[in-house]
Image (cartoon, rainbow, N blue to C red):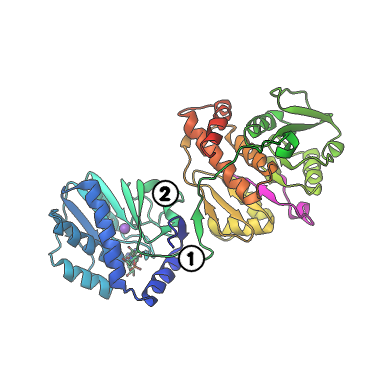
């Protein structure tokens, strides 16, 4: 069985390659399959335009010699630039099989970067970086094989400050984290994957798959579809926006609970505002989920409200100010899951509060998900979802137009709505992110938060 959405660390990739070798493959046959598959993509993208392949010393370079040979066999004019001789036996053999003579430099048409892949261990030195940029600038179409050279495979960090932008990146065998994490993700262009027979790797991270949502059953009513209560705080606008979005996320009933002393505010007519003692309002046994945090504020009163909501032990989404206030003691003894939805700054603050520091972002979200015994949605241009006891999930990129005020409140509302319908915390998080991204695609360029909310029903229908 194939596992095209799985995302492997360099170490998991090497182990997967070793399992294939133990199963009868050889490094040569794997390189041949990887190189031939990559050459097919290059040929489909560029036809018989001339190609320059930059080959490094390792097996990424070995791929390059295989690609050169396959393209030449199809009649393509290929030049190879090899600043470093092959260091591995299989790359040496691939160079011999190519049979040509490398050139010092080349220009025009298509550039194929096979300098380094998952074995890059340190920043490129000035000479190699200069050659990489020179060749990239001298060609009008740029393809990276396995990874753009200079990228750290597991973290998505750039080991060199400035790296070339590519039109296409051809991943070999499996996605690596840097194909889907910033800043490396931004260099990739379109991403292609060459299958070399790597099977499912247990506990591997994976790309989130589009959800299959359902319409309510015929005998549904507002309570059976789920009652979500959004806690209003000092700045009720954010909770109104979150509740407005939640109406379209699947829950049958959305309320805003406002403390009697909080300022007067209005909401859409189909969002009920209940005002009174919060301690009494949250005790309604029909409540299926809470959303607390948007507009909550950071006062002692806000902290007390958060504490009380968490003490109710109902599935709860904690967003925004709730993440600034959240402390380990607040979740002790809970059985129901929490979904935390931090942006980068809130993630750092949570990591300090829960002593999950000194690790990279992928490890951190898994560690924090265990600490809160729930799910953590690390929001950003690359959204990572960690859940206690499961491997991380990476969301496919959503439109950058989401970088506008209020979209975080909307995401929290959508996730909380999914949670209120009875979806597991992990599914609720992924489904909320999919609805959010699809609504952004439907809303088109330069949408406001209100327009994003209006696009959610059409987004929902995309997953029915
Ligand atoms: N995924 C697959 O199924 C296959 C992957 N293949 C390719 O193999 C590379 C990984 O090969 P590896 O030799 O481990 O690493 P690299 O080719 O990236 O090169 C590492 C090589 O370079 C030296 N090195 C590391 N950093 C630097 C530096 N900054 N400056 C100079 N030299 C450096 C290091 O010592 C190594 O010698 C993978 O990406 C795929 O492209 C195979 O084709 C098999 C199938
Ligand atoms: K490369």
- Does the rendering let one see residue 222? yes
Which stretch did the figure color magenta? Answer: 324-344
Are there few (<14), some (14-19), or many (20+) residues within 10 Å of tag 2? many
Residue at mark 2 to residue at mark 1: CA–CA distance: 23 Å
Label whose residue precedes the other's in the sequence (2 or 1): 2
Instruction: Name the quadrant containing residue 10.
Output: bottom left
- Does the rendering let one see residue 83? no
Q: Is residue 190 above or below residue 255?
A: below
Q: Does the segment drawn in magenta span residue 361?
A: no
In the displayed structure image, the side of residue 251 where residue 65 appears, left or right? left
Are there few (<14), some (14-19), or many (20+) residues within 10 Å of tag 1? some
**Residue 364 coordinates in the image, percent (x, y):** 58, 57
> Quarter of the image containing the C terminus?
top right
Q: What residue is disc 2 on? A: 185
> Quarter of the image containing the N terminus?
bottom left
**Residue 231 coordinates in the image, percent (x, y):** 75, 36
**Residue 311 coordinates in the image, percent (x, y):** 81, 48
Label 1: which secondary element? loop
Instruction: Single out the residue that lies furthest toward the front.
Output: 218
Q: Which mark is residue 201?
A: 1
Label 2: which secondary element? helix
In the displayed structure image, the side of residue 356 where residue 393 appears, left or right? left
Residue nearest the viewer, comparing 163 with 202: 202
């Amino acid at each position: 069985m194939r596992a095209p959405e799985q995302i492997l660390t360099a170490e998991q990739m090497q182990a997967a390659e070793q399992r294939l070798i133990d199963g009868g493959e050889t490094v040569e046959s794997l390189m041949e399959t990887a190189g031939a598959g990559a050459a097919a993509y290059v040929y489909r993208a560029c036809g018989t335009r001339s190609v320059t392949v930059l080959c490094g010393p390792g097996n990424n370079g070995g791929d390059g010699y295989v690609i050169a040979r396959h393209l030449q066999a199809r009649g393509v004019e290929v030049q190879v630039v090899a600043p470093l001789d092959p260091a591995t036996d299989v790359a040496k053999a691939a160079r011999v099989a190519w049979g040509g003579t490398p050139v010092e430099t080349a220009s025009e048409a298509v550039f194929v970067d096979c300098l380094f892949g998952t074995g890059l261990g340190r920043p490129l030195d000035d000479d190699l970086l200069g050659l990489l940029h020179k060749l990239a600038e001298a060609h009008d179409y740029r393809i990276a094989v396995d990874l753009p050279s200079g990228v750290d495979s597991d973290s998505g960090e750039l080991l060199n400050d400035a790296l070339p932008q590519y039109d296409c990146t051809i991943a070999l065998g499996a996605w690596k984290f840097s194909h889907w994490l910033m800043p490396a993700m931004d260099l990739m262009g379109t991403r292609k994957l060459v299958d070399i027979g790597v099977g499912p790797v247990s506990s591997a991270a994976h790309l989130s798959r589009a959800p299959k949502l359902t319409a309510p059953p015929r005998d549904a009513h507002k309570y059976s579809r789920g009652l979500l209560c959004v806690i209003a705080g000092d700045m009720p606008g954010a909770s109104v926006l979150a509740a407005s979005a939640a109406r379209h996320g699947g829950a049958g009933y959305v309320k805003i609970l406002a403390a009697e002393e909080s300022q007067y505010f209005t909401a859409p007519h189909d969002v009920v505002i209940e005002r009174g003692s919060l301690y009494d309002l949250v005790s309604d046994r029909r409540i299926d989920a809470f959303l607390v945090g948007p507009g909550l504020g950071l006062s002692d009163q806000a902290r007390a409200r958060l504490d009380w909501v968490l003490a109710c032990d109902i599935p709860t989404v904690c967003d925004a100010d709730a993440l600034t206030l959240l402390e380990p003691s607040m979740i002790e003894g809970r059985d129901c899951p929490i979904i935390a939805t931090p942006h980068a700054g809130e993630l750092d603050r949570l990591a300090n509060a829960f002593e999950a520091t000194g690790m990279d972002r992928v490890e951190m979200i898994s560690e924090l998900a265990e600490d809160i015994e729930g799910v953590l949605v690390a929001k950003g241009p690359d959204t990572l979802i960690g859940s206690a006891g499961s491997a991380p999930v990476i969301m496919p990129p959503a439109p950058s137009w989401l970088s506008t005020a209020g979209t975080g409140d909307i995401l929290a509302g959508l996730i909380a709505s999914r949670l209120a319908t009875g979806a597991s915390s992990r599914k609720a998080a992924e489904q909320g992110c999919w609805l959010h991204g699809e609504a952004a695609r439907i809303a088109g360029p330069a949408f406001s938060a209100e327009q994003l909310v209006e696009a959610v029903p059409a987004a929902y229908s995309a997953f029915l």
